[in-house]
Image: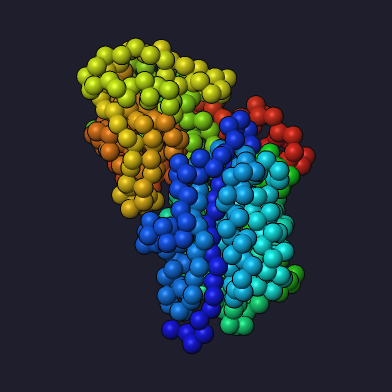
Amino acid sequence: MCGLSFKILSAEIAHETNTFNVVPTTLQAFRDRYFLKGAQAIGARGDQNTELAGLLDTGRDYGWDITHVMSAAAGPGGVVTREAFAALTDDLFAAAEDKWDGIFLMLHGAMVTEFCQDGEGEILTRLRAIVGPDVPIAVTLDPHANVSKAMCDLAQILVSYTTYPHLDFRATARRAAELLQRTMTGDISPITLRAHRPMLEEANGGRTDMGPMIARHAQARAFETRKGVYAISINGAFPCADIAEVGPTVLITCDGQSPAHQSIAEELAEDIWTRRREALNTYLTCDEAAKIALAWNGSAGPLVIADYADNPGSGAYGDATNLLAALLHAGIEDCCFGPLVDPAAAAFLQDKAPGTAVTLDIGGATAPTFGGGPLHVTGKVQWVGDGRVVGNGPMLGGLERSFGPTAVLQVAGIDILIVSIAHQMLDLMQFETFGIDPAKKSVVALKSMQHFRAAFAPIAGRIVVCDSGALCTLNYASLNYQNVPRPIFPLD
């Protein structure tokens, strides 16, 4: 226990903004995921694998007096409204008027609002105007952050998760909080430097379970043993943001601005650029994925098909139907599919008893040109009710999510999970809660890019990914980029 009791102001404000999504992210969208004030946030998130838990761990170690203002996050989606931004930040800015020894922010790093391209930079700019230039600010980031120059200028400490799937939330916060402690005691005087390359994203979106990011992170940890180097963060970026400062970055939180420190960041960033064509995934068409499913016997475990392009975790609508249509056309059985985000269909099914036969249109309503239009189906209701889920896997263990009103509709051998609130699949309980056991299926079709692997890889006999042509398609030329600097890879 340290003799000094430092006063720490903290807040968690997270959003990953897909600027091509036409549905704005409102305050209700944050409430749909979580919008928790103070003690309520600590009670719900203070002892799980969260950044807040990591902050509280370190605070206990050093006897900090922590005032946690709020924890709020919305599912990835369209630009954050002015009203939502105000609701997220007003309490933080009001609290900042007090005297603080340090500030700890848990941000995503890819927020875009109705009025600015750099939501996190805007938060930090307004905070600095209140607290002045000297109060140390530590920030944790998702490695899919589009880190701006302003963010690095305004916060002394920025530390990103090192894993994708993201498994080190709590550990990352502890790393950043330890640096904040050292800064407040005067042991170090850090700044954060940035290296950037003209790309929409790292070749594999920052994937760390295999491929070149493994060696990059090993190199980064080796660099961190050098004198004056405190943390190195490698950010794969978020490509579905049409903003001026999009793209992969390497950050080095270090003691002073020196050419040697900048060169470390540049060396890692240059490797990202040099290997920009080395993609690990093979992206199948929906018909190709269905053909593999038709030949799969399931004896080694289910075939897991991930629709990369319709991932709600990257701001896709989650209602694309091209993959489901291909599976139905191929006659795939003993299969589950989810989530299909369709509030109207979920509402229609709520008063139907299990076993009821129904005919209706599902999916494809938001933007049929991205991933397929509505499917007219006849099926049997399997489950209806509230979509509350408590996870038990590596990412969501002990944490609650809600799909809103939810139904399971069996259509020709496929159990379709129809939900009202968009979440990507990253925990087995997101199927099991609704009477679907994915481990016992022959084929599991889900909407996610990479996070699903943490929970689904252990049960999978094989994993394939497909591009359904939905909003997060790898065909970037089909998106109408206007604000990114040109030339940029892979558009040019």
Chosen colour scheme: rainbow
Q: Is residue 316 left or right of residue 416?
A: right
In the rendered view, tell whether residue 273 sits above or below residue 151: above
What is the x, y in percent for residue 419?
39, 30
Q: Is residue 385 left or right of residue 99?
A: left
Res 125 visible: yes
Residue 349 sits in quarter: top left
Residue furthest toward the left?
A: 355
Quadrant holding the C terminus: top right
Residue at point 57%, 58% (across, down): 91
Q: Is residue 141 left or right of residue 194?
A: left
What is the x, y in percent for residue 39?
42, 61
Quadrant holding the N terminus: bottom left
Q: Which of the pair 487/32 is nearer the observer?
A: 32
Residue at point 62%, 49% (across, down): 86
Residue at point 54%, 71% (across, down): 8
Res 220 visible: no
In the rendered view, tell whether residue 194 sits above or below residue 185: above
Q: Is residue 317 left or right of residue 152?
A: left
What is the x, y in percent for residue 139?
58, 62
Q: Which of the pair 423/233 is nearer the observer?
A: 423
Residue at point 27%, 18% (across, down): 380
Q: Which of the pair 404/314 is nearer the observer?
A: 404
What is the x, y in percent for residue 334?
26, 25
How many marks the image carries: the answer is 0
